[in-house]
Image (cartoon, grey):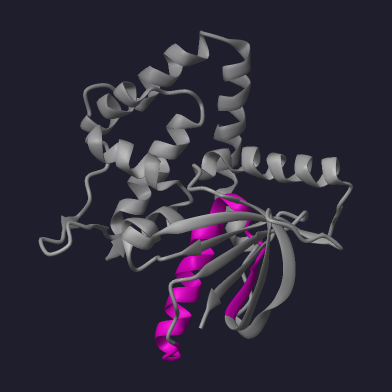
Amino acid sequence: MYTSGQFAMIGNVGRKALRLYREEELLIPAMQCEENGYYYYDESQLSKLTTIKRLRSIGISLFEIKQILSGEVSEEEILSSKIKETDDLLRDMKKMASDKKIDGVKEADNLPIEPDIRPFEKCICLYVDENVELEKLGISVGKLYEVAAHKGVEVAGSHFVRYDGLMDDAKFAMKTCLPVNDYRGEDTIELFEESCLHINFQGGFSKVSDAHKIMRQYAEEHLIELSDRVYEVYNQDMSVDLYYVI
């Protein structure tokens, strides 16, 4: 079972999106704890979340998605209707269909290496301290690059997201960070972790949930106790460096 924070991280969505899907009865949590009121999801619900994200990415409304999930209409009927609306949407949908056909090849060609233990190297970062929707992560990253350019600061590495409070929804938070050189201010933060379970995942940003599964399974098999802090570093080659703080 996953807390809302854990499920949002693994499913690569914001908690606001999860709350919306719950309220619209698209994705109901597997259970709610009577003691603290927290919602919990199980791994089997990731496939439904993937379906919802996929349909939302091409402009399908929540109402239409609810109809599809309930079986009132078929996905093919909705897609056929949307294809006729605009050429741009048709192009996006064709790309998605192509991506789905080669998913198996992608996964076979991009098997991740075994995790290792290493530090998260010290860095000074500009950051945005907000619980943004991960679908809109680019907006926060864009803000950081604009700040760096305005201040004449040199970017020192790939942008990343830090998650905190994964085991306690009341403390859940995330920071979008951009490493920089030779600059310190109220809008920067110094980060360093002495020991982390790490993996470089080559499967692409959209498949990062697979890397989280690998890390959690590896930690369980090797009796490694993970904290509730995780870093996701998004590299230019579309790989992701994932750090679970030990």
62 left or right, relative to 209: left
- For image coordinates 63% across by 16% down, the residue present is 88
State the image coordinates of residue 108 (x, y, percent, origin top left): 60, 62
Indicate yes or no whether the magenta region holds residue 213.
yes
- For image coordinates 62% across by 74% down, the residue present is 199
Residue 76 position by quadrant: top left
Indicate yes or no whether the magenta region holds residue 207.
yes
24 left or right, relative to 113: left
Seen from this angle, which residue lies furthest top? 85
State the image coordinates of residue 19 (x, y, percent, origin top left): 31, 42
- Above or below 4: residue 79: above
What stretch of residues is rendered in magenta?
Answer: 197-224
- For image coordinates 51% across by 8% down, the residue present is 84
Seen from this angle, which residue lies furthest bottom? 223
Residue 238 position by quadrant: bottom right
Residue 231 position by quadrant: bottom right
State the image coordinates of residue 212 (x, y, percent, origin top left): 49, 67
- Above or below 167: residue 39: above
